[in-house]
Amino acid sequence: MSDDKKLKQLLASAQQELNRLTTAQRYQSRKEKTHRKIVLGGEVAKYLGLDIEQDVLVGFLIKCRNCSDDDVEKMRALGSRARYHESIRQIQDKENKRKSAKLNREK
């Protein structure tokens, strides 16, 4: 096989590998974005409920986009506290379920 043909095959192989890696990277990025959207949608459902009108939600989000930096910081602090208290509640629920299961086994 000539050197020119070997070089072309090597180049084609490298290009194929680059295409594979690029496709894998795009897939992973799309997967991460989809996961993020699902998580954010779950937060909306948890705190606003599923019965909120879509137009009201969109209007609220547009209004929030135009908030001052100070307002954003206040919302961030409020959200952080709410999520912290939610995690504590979940831990307490798990502990209560564990204790309840233990009592049921002892009966």
Image (cartoon, rainbow, N blue to C red):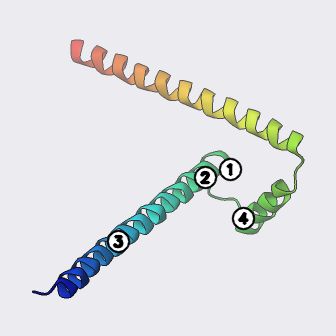
Give the mark nearer the N terminus: 3 vs 2: 3
What residue appears at the point 68 percent right and 50 percent down from the top-left corner?
48
Q: Are marks 2 and 1 in contact (CB under 8 Å)?
A: yes
* Residue 44 seen in render: yes
Residue 103 screen position, x and y as percent: 30, 14
Q: Are marks 1 and 3 in contact (CB under 8 Å)?
A: no
Quadrant where the N terminus is found in the figure:
bottom left
Q: CA distance from mark 4 to mark 1?
A: 10 Å
Give the mark nearer the N terminus: 3 vs 4: 3
Give me the disc on residue 53: 4
Give the mark nearer the N terminus: 4 vs 1: 1
**Mark 3 residue type:** Leu
Q: Are marks 4 and 2 in contact (CB under 8 Å)?
A: no
Give the mark nearer the N terminus: 1 vs 3: 3
Of 45 and 96, the residue lying toward us: 45
Q: Are marks 3 and 4 in contact (CB under 8 Å)?
A: no
Badge 4 element:
loop
Q: CA distance from mark 3 to mark 4?
A: 46 Å
Give me the disc on residue 48: 1
Badge 2 element:
helix
- Tell me the quarter of the picture where residue 20 sits: bottom left
Residue 26 screen position, x and y as percent: 44, 68
Viewer-side label of 3, 2: 3
Give me the disc on residue 45: 2
Give me the disc on residue 18: 3
- Tell me the quarter of the picture where residue 21 sits: bottom left
Q: CA distance from mark 2 to mark 1?
A: 5 Å
